[in-house]
Structure formats: C-alpha cells, structure tokens
Image (cartoon, rainbow, N blue to C red):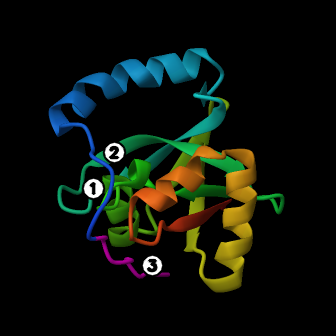
Amino acid sequence: MSIEKLPAGSRGAKTPPRLVVKLLMPIMEKIHRRSGDRFGGFDVLYLHTVGAKSGQARTSPVARMDDGKGGVLVVASYGGAQQHPAWYHNIVAHPDQVSMEYGGRVQRVTVRQLEGDERAHAWTHITEQVPRFKGYETKTDRELPVLRLTAV
C-alpha cells in the first residue's frame, strides 16, 4: 500500500516555530487526555507514526471525525499552512507503520488517502462536524489531504 504525496502550496497560514511546538506539545497532550480526548470543540486522536527521515516513533494529536462507516477521518491541514504537517510526510514514507490512539486504546490502522468524489463527500462531512476546516482551505492553495484510518 502506498500513498502519493500531494504537492505543497505556494501560500498559507503562518506556523509556530518548531521549538515552541516541541515545548508545548507535551503540555497540550496532557490537557487533551484529561479532557477526554477533546480540544477546541472537536475530538482528538493520537496518531502514532514513524519519522520519515529519522525512523523514530512519533506521536501527533490530530482532530478526528467518525466517517459513519467504521473508520476515522483526519485532515493534514496544518491550520491552512503552505506545507503539510510532519505526520503526513511520516505516513507517506511509512504507511504500513501507523496506529491511532483514543479513549485509552491503541489500534493499528490502514491508511487511505481519499480522492475525487469520495474526498468531496468526506470534506462536506468534516466541515459539518468541524466548521473551522473551511477556513483552513481558504488560507492555502494546496489540497488538504483527507485520510481514512481503518482499524486492522
């Protein structure tokens, strides 16, 4: 199974410095876990990947949406930034080494990048659940990857 990496954009939202993210992420993860895997009005999952370059285990909190078909949808939005989030690069590099965690349960998953009508339908579903994603789409000219995670 492989995932074709979508191209980065030529414009997008500003992202915080990596050092700030590195320092704040452990604190944010504790807050998410204490609040029942919720943050900012949406559900959160912890995406476990393998670093594209480093080969080291990585954990990234991301918004999750139930797809209504037994899977979970995630969007590589990075807040509408010009580039994709690191976890997306990790998934593209190692799509067979991905798991998700929420509700205290870790599950290995298969990952499929949605395209065409299937992506459009999922995007409508996502923006109905979390309207802020509409704003991310207008901040950048890149296509925001929509991925379906299905437990193995």
Q: Secondary structure at mark 2?
A: strand
x 65%, y 74%: residue? 119
Q: x and y percent of residue 2 in the render?
A: 45, 81
Q: CA distance from mark 3 to mark 1?
A: 15 Å
Give the residue type that dot 3 points to.
Answer: Ile
Q: Which residue is mark 2?
A: 58
Dominant SS in magenta: loop
Residue 150 part of the magenta segment: no
Q: Earlier in the sequence, mark 3 or mark 2?
A: 3
Q: Which residue is mark 3?
A: 3
x 19%, y 38%: residue? 18
x 55%, y 74%: residue? 113
Dot 1, crowdedness within 10 Å: few (<14), some or many (≥20)?
some
Q: Earlier in the sequence, mark 1 or mark 2?
A: 1
Left or right of 80? Residue 117 is right
x 23%, y 24%: residue? 23
Q: Quadrant of the C terminus?
A: bottom right
Residue 7 part of the magenta segment: yes
Q: Secondary structure at mark 1?
A: loop
Q: Earlier in the sequence, mark 3 or mark 1?
A: 3
Q: Which residue is mark 1?
A: 51
Region of the chain picked out in magenta, as a range: 1-9
CB atoms of marks 1 and 2 within 8 Å: yes
Q: x and y percent of residue 10 in the render?
A: 26, 70
Relative to residue 28, is residue 128 depicted above or below? below
Q: x and y percent of residue 3 in the render?
A: 45, 78
